[in-house]
Image: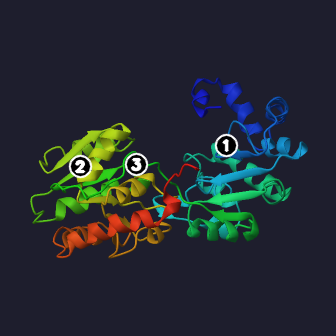
Amino acid sequence: MNNDVIKDMGILSKIGLALETTWSISEFVRFKKFLLRENPDVVHFHNFFPLISPSAYYACHSLNIPVVQTLHNYRLLCPAATFLRKNEICEKCLNGSILNSVKNGCYRDSVIQTLPVAAMIKFNNFIRTWNRKVDRYITLTEFAKKKFIEGGIPESKIVVKPNFIAQKEKMSKINEKENYILFVGRISKEKGVDILLSAWEKIFDKQGNKLLIVGDGPEKKLLEEQYNQHKDIEFLGKLNEDQVLTFMKKAKYLVVPSIWYEGFPMTIIEAFSVGTPVIASNIGSLQEVVVHGKNGFHFNYGDSNALKECLEMALKFNDYQDLIQNTFNIYPENKIWQKTTPT
């Protein structure tokens, strides 16, 4: 299933989808037939929303097939899946009624579109889908685990397994760094790219460094037009995995200025794997993944002045060589970040 098919749906099909998002009878039947044909030992879900619906759990349960669900975002607790509203952290649905999301139109800024998502969360909470039909949840960080426990998921059902990468090459030495810092990701509000650009613009002495922005998204065109006169800022667009890793190896820092509770950005693991320190917001799991002064630095999230000061400090950091050596050394110690091949 691919959510891209929604774009081609007519209005009646979209209305039907909205109704089936809560619990799809047709998907239950379709998925059960699939399970009977394939006879899996376990089913591992990454996303059931909105096309498959939680009814797929029930199809598995009816055949006594264990269910594992990796939680990449906070959809089970928050219709927006981000705990973010109007670019501010919002936990009203976690600590109060899910109706807050409907009132505020949290899903795609629409009350109408939020209603079926909120109904899906509320109904499946009521019939205890999350607690009874999933055998094990995987969160990417301890921070996320705590949030889901707050939301009512039993702690005994949750394990932490961070994202990981398969290293294509074993690095024997640290790459020579060049005069640039790097952002890689979706160029959108929650990623804080506007905050990074504002902070970079305020730095008087950039030590001859450039800021490279890799990625695409809804904010790209606006920000590119706003900063197109700055010779020390380059928008490189979307690049493939190998191109990104090439830039990552030689960057002085990767910057992750997000203003929401990130899961576990793959870009951070990629940076660590090539010995590149990370400058990240002091919010959510980013505080856990990036250890201040060990493999990068934190700054007060959403504050361009705080990021400016952090960047100035980082660019002039006297023990920079020790910092990248430490980042390089720490990565292989964390085996959970690396995909391993059984022998």
Apparent side of residue 252 relative to residue 150 in the rendered image (left or right): left
Apparent side of residue 177 relative to residue 73 in the rendered image (left or right): left
Disc 2, disc 3: CB below 8 Å? no
Residue, disc 2: 212
Q: Earlier in the sequence, mark 2 or mark 1?
A: 1
Give, as a three-letter code, the residue at label 2: Leu
Query: Callout 3: 10 Å neighbours few (<14), some, many (20+)?
Result: some
**Who's the residue at 34% across and 42% down the image?**
215
The image quarter in which residue 294 lies: bottom left
Q: Earlier in the sequence, mark 2 or mark 3?
A: 3
The image quarter in which residue 197 lies: bottom left
**Who's the residue at 23% across and 59% down the image?**
252
Viewer-closest of 148 and 120:
148
Measure the C-alpha gap from mark 2 to mark 3: 16 Å
Measure the C-alpha gap from mark 1 to mark 3: 21 Å
**Who's the residue at 33% across and 37% down the image?**
239
Query: Callout 2: 10 Å neighbours few (<14), some, many (20+)?
Result: many
Apparent side of residue 298 relative to residue 84 in the rendered image (left or right): left
Give, as a three-letter code, the residue at label 3: Ser
Where is residue 25? Give x, y as percent. Answer: 84, 35
Can residue 300 be seen by looking at this rendering? yes
Where is residue 228? Give x, y as percent. Answer: 17, 43
Query: Callout 1: 10 Å neighbours few (<14), some, many (20+)?
Result: some
What scheme was used to colour the molecule? rainbow
Apparent side of residue 302 relative to residue 155 in the rendered image (left or right): left
Residue, disc 3: 188
Residue, disc 1: 49
Is label 1 in a helix, a strand or a loop?
Answer: loop
Where is residue 205? Give x, y as percent. Answer: 10, 66
Measure the C-alpha gap from mark 2 to mark 1: 34 Å
Is label 3 in a helix, a strand or a loop?
Answer: loop
Q: Earlier in the sequence, mark 1 or mark 3?
A: 1
